Image (cartoon, grey):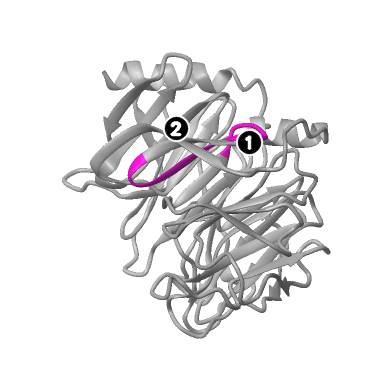
Amino acid sequence: MKKVWIMALLAFAACKNDTKSTEESTKEDQVSTHRIFEKVEIEPILESDSLSIRAIEVIGSNLAFAANHGTYGLYNSAAGTWKLSQQKYDSLTPEFRAVGSTASDFFMLSVANPALLYKTGDDGKMKLVYKEENEKVFYDAIAFWNDKEGIAMGDPTDDCLSVIVTRDGGNSWEKIDCSKLPKAAEGEAAFAASNSNIAIEGDHVWILSGGMKSRVFHSADKGENWEVAETPLLQGKPTLGGYSMDFYDAENGIIIGGNYEDPEGNTGNKAITKDGGKTWNLIADGQEPNYKSSVRYVPSGNGKEIVAAGFTGISYTKDAGKTWEKLSDEGFFTLRFLNDSTAYAAGSKRIAKLHFK
């Protein structure tokens, strides 16, 4: 059954033709055919009392995920069916909170010690391509520039954030030495809340940290050289700071978060950049939305339309974050757009398709 599942995944991934997601391709068209969102209809497509799902990946029109209990799966949107499986490592059952894909492979990365990174293998099984053992190891997110080059990030095990890169399609990964990265502040880490601590545009990559310090790390050359920028988000406690980020293009981006222990708080929890992450300014401070764990630009929204989700509900802005409207009280951990009016969202015990209208 596992071999059948993996071969199906490879077939669906191949339908992508290149590394551009449906979201990116639609965004580049720059033609908005949808109305301003006024509501969202939520269509459950997977329900399981045992799952907590924080990592999803759109593959063509389909969806892949990996979650707790070593569970991962693929949704065939045309048939409306799921293929589910479980990954174990010796006697361990990993918890996955980061997933990614290239045109031919699916990747899933576990949190905690040991860190385990798997990719689809030639024999039809998931293949372990990176392992890291350290009592402090905790990876949070993974993303790819193209079919050959990818990056994953996690909490510091030394005096910098943990950053690993691949240049060979994910077959091997190398950890960047701390001498090449900005030094992490005391208590600076990241939140494995929605697999969105990383944003990629062209050769650029941005990484969002949180906790005692919440900053944005940036590389313009695929991880070779780095700089870091301060943010105005609330920080200084382990549960504060940025939880999610997204960039519409190389200049315009958004970060969001707050404090999951104070989910109604709406001050110092969201900011935008217009200069590629060099400077960040608070938006809608003291207003909707409150704590959120996932934020995404609407693909054809010209950088103005953004949706934020969390266990506190779903919110939407049509003016680049100046004002927001709450569309739903239903909670999700993570969100990914399929096109300019449809998204997949995942959270506690379920995955749903969101229809924005």
Q: Is residue 166 visible?
A: no
The quarter of the image holding the C terminus is top right
Residue density around tag 1, few if under 14, some if 14–19, many if 20 or more, within 10 Å:
some
Indicate whether residue 345 is drawn in magenta: yes
Q: How many marks?
A: 2
Residue at the disc numbered 1? 148
**Amino acid at circle 2:** Ala
Secondary structure under tag 1 reads loop
Residue toward you, 213 or 242: 242
* Vertical arrangement, residue 277 with respect to residue 261, above or below: above
Q: Which residues are magenta?
A: 337-350
- Residues at discs 1 and 2 in contact (Cβ within 8 Å): no
Where residue 243 appears, as percent x and y from the top left, is 52, 64
Q: Residue 342 is drawn in which quadrant?
A: top right
Point 73% across, 31% down: residue: 25
Q: Residue 289 is drawn in which quadrant?
A: bottom right
Point 53% across, 23% down: residue: 13
* Vertical arrangement, residue 346 with respect to residue 198, above or below: above
Residue at the disc numbered 2? 64
The quarter of the image holding the N terminus is top left
Point 29% across, 47% down: residue: 68
Residue density around tag 2, few if under 14, some if 14–19, many if 20 or more, within 10 Å:
many
Where residue 158 appears, as percent x and y from the top left, is 47, 74
Residue toward you, 328 or 62: 328
Q: Residue furthest left?
A: 91
